[in-house]
Image (spheres, rainbow, N blue to C red):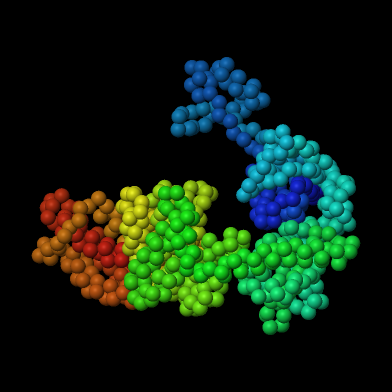
């Protein structure tokens, strides 16, 4: 009963701050939970689990089933060596007596243990667990400060680095304050409600008390409930205005993390602004003001919007007029930029890119366009795409909007506004679409280019970026990747897989290197090898995250990485064969044995069949020559499962060969080379599918 009582403890921790950026909050709550779970585990404090809650002004954590104290720990301590601890007669010396006294035990309680360094005195002691409140007072400050943030700050004269200044800390274990200090603030038993509607301190006595007070103080502390409240409020006012809101999860998440108590209102803007491209209107509302756009039943944009406030307004009309006034100014600016941009043909801005520095060592944005346009043409040649005129036009146009006033004001419209301007000027539709698509995918899991031109330009632009950065030693390290090279590599891999293009990655990189060499001096071979290695690592990371076995992945990408579009099919079929073949492990072990024995052996060019002395040699060579061409035919048709099934027929002859033949014989070097050469042919055939030496069996 006593143990059951000790596991009913509850913890409430809340760090009150100035407003946290909306994009930081979700990850911070996840990281805080992980840090606390790990901290409790490493400090032997049993618990039933934790939940995190948060708003722009607070990070909160609730723990359940928390033990009153740490688990006891049985700990071992080594003392002096046996030959020092006891004299010749076996009596304890001062060293043994001193060790026993230090450990609080008698000499009779000491044991002798054998270690790599010899025999030593040893004692096991039971270290009683400390009260949980004492431990938490020591470890919670470090846990809180260990939450990773994209950017942190210091304030005042306080030696503390956190996302925003801390204003209060609520920390109770079973209703009692856990005392600690952080950022100049002492932990206490109070919280604060909504900044404007309930700003006074509120005393808290328990977890249930905390949630009651939050509800009464106009704070929706649960992000999931707050998000649903935002969604419902937006949909309600939109329906009342005769419109609807298209799904926008990213904006919904952003707004959820901007408010503690959401209240939605609907406003309007002048119909004349509907003449602007829809993307401009939505961006002005969405990114600058965090407003939701409103559509009619035909999915046409209406001259209305929905704004979500953080307070319940006293006079809703005043609030709406304020939102309308701010948006009107934004749209007026956008209208001016649009008209100014349209006064000049888009293609004439290509020359302006010469004044835009892309990177100091890699030249201007114009230089970059010249490079990836040539690379894109080489890619089209390899694919047999005969679209030279459209490709060159799309390449010349795709960066021109970077120097428009619209993109200077709304950077997220790059590509989008270029497509709109190109359409207005009557360029071919696929060229216009390619201008936007060459930026796709914009994120790890977002949409890929749908047109050939867009896909080719996306690959060429990104590959030029990666190669250029490696050439001038701007290589990603740790979490630092200022040119987003990891994302660019992943994007290229995804496009190649999606379109099933059998492009040689090595050839493309080499082409990018040769083009770049015309402008920049660097070691071509070194950059080629590093970029290939970089792509291999990104692919390994991608495919392992998808749940594939590391042995199978390594065995394939170590021998067949060049054509990325083919890799997943190889891995899938090898995985299927490994599951369906009951003897796969033995098969892999046999092939691995071949690789091991050939390690450090020189290449043998010719096989002399007249030197075969054992029947197992004749059978192995006969089996190999019979299956070789058929295996290659399966590989050419990308039937890797069939190729593997045929290769499995080599297992028996290889095993017999090893059982009956001394491969590395010293009696006759010519005989040894002949046998090594035969195994090299077998291994080479196997490696056209996978390198079985990578299997950890």
| Residue at x-position 68% and y-position 61% | 288
Is 506 positioned to the left or the right of 58 in the image?
left
Furthest residue toward bottom: 298
Does residue 75 appear to the left or right of 672 in the view shown? right
Q: Position of residue 688 (x, y in %)?
A: 31, 66
Q: Residue 453: image x %, image y %?
A: 44, 73
Question: Is 365 placed left or right of 96 in the picture?
Answer: left
Residue at x 68% of width, y 79% of height: 300
* Res. 209 in view: no
Indicate the position of residue 166 as horizontal and vertical percent values: 75, 43
Q: Nearer the viewer, residue 300 or 426?
A: 426
Q: Above or below — where is 433 with respect to 664?
A: below
Q: Is residue 436 left or right of residue 642?
A: right
Between 479 and 279, the residue placed more toward the observer is 279
Residue occupying the point 28% across, 73% down = 632
Q: Residue at x 29, y 57 (%)?
A: 595
Q: Quadrant of residue 670?
A: bottom left
Query: Is 677 situated above or below 296?
Result: above
The answer to which of 203 and 547 lies nearer the viewer is: 203
Count of numbered marks: 0
Q: Is residue 380 visible?
A: yes
Location of the C terminus by quadrant is: bottom left
Q: Where is residue 323? Give x, y as percent.
A: 78, 64
In depth, the one of 235 and 335 nearer the eye is 335
**Does 296 sit above or below residue 131?**
below
């Amino acid at each position: 009963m006593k143990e059951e009582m000790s596991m009913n403890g509850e913890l409430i921790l809340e760090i009150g701050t100035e407003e946290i950026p909306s994009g930081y909050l979700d990850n911070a709550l996840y990281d805080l939970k992980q840090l606390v779970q790990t901290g409790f585990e490493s400090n032997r404090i049993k618990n039933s689990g934790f939940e995190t809650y948060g708003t722009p002004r607070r990070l909160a954590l609730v723990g359940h089933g928390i033990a009153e104290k740490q688990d006891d720990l049985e700990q071992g301590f080594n003392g002096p060596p046996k030959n020092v601890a006891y004299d010749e007669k076996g009596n304890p010396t001062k060293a043994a007596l001193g060790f026993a006294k230090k450990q609080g035990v008698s000499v009779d309680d000491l044991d002798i243990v054998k270690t790599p360094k010899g025999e030593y005195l040893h004692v096991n002691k039971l270290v009683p667990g400390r009260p949980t409140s004492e431990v938490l007072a020591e470890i919670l400050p470090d846990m809180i400060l260990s939450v990773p943030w994209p950017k942190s700050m210091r304030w005042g004269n306080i030696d503390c680095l956190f996302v925003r200044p801390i204003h209060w800390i609520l920390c109770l274990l079973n209703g009692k304050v856990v005392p600690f200090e952080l950022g100049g603030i002492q932990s206490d038993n109070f919280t604060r409600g909504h900044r404007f509607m309930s700003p006074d301190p509120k005393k808290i006595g328990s977890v249930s008390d905390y949630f009651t007070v939050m509800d009464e103080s106009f704070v929706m502390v649960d992000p999931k409930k707050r998000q649903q409240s935002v969604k419902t409020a937006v949909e309600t006012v939109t329906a009342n205005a005769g419109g609807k809101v298209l799904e926008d999860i990213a904006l919904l998440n952003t707004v959820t993390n901007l408010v503690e108590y959401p209240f939605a209102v609907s406003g309007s803007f002048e119909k004349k602004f509907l003449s602007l491209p829809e993307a401009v209107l939505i961006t002005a509302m969405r990114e600058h003001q965090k407003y939701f756009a409103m559509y009619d039943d035909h999915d046409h944009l209406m001259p209305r919007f929905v704004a979500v406030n953080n307070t319940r307004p006293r006079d809703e009309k005043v609030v709406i007029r304020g939102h309308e006034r701010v948006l009107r100014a934004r749209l007026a600016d956008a209208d001016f930029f649009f008209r100014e941009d349209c006064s000049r043909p888009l293609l004439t801005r290509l020359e302006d890119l010469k004044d835009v520095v892309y990177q100091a060592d890699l030249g201007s944005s114009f230089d970059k366009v010249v490079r990836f346009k040539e690379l894109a043409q080489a890619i089209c040649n390899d694919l047999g795409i005969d679209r030279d005129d459209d490709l060159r036009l799309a390449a010349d146009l795709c960066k021109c909007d970077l120097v428009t006033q619209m993109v200077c004001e709304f950077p997220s419209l790059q590509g989008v506004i270029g497509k709109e301007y190109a359409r207005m000027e009557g360029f071919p539709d696929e060229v216009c679409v390619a201008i936007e698509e060459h930026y796709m995918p914009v994120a790890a899991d977002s949409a890929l280019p749908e047109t050939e031109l867009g896909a080719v330009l996306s690959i060429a632009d990104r590959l030029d970026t990666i190669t250029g950065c490696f050439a001038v030693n701007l290589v990603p390290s740790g979490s630092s990747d200022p040119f987003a090279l990891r994302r660019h590599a992943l994007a290229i891999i995804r496009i190649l897989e999606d379109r099933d293009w059998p492009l040689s990655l090595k050839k493309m990189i080499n082409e990018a290197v040769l083009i770049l060499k015309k402008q920049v001096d660097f070691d071509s071979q070194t950059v080629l090898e590093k970029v290939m290695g970089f792509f291999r690592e990104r692919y390994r990371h991608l495919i392992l995250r998808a749940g594939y076995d590391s042995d199978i992945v390594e065995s394939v990408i170590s021998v067949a990485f060049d054509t990325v579009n083919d890799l997943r099919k190889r891995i899938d079929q090898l995985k299927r064969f490994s599951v369906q073949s009951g003897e796969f492990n033995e098969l892999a072990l046999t092939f691995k044995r071949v690789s091991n024995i050939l390690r450090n052996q020189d290449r043998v060019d010719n096989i002399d069949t007249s030197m075969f002395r054992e029947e197992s040699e004749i059978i192995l060579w006969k089996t190999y020559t019979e299956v070789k061409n058929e295996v290659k035919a399966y590989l050419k048709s990308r039937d890797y499962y069939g190729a593997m099934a045929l290769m499995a027929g080599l297992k028996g002859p290889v095993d017999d060969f090893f059982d009956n033949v001394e491969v590395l014989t010293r009696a006759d070097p010519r005989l040894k080379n002949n046998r090594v050469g035969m195994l090299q042919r077998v291994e080479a055939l196997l490696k056209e599918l996978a390198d079985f030496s990578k299997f950890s069996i």
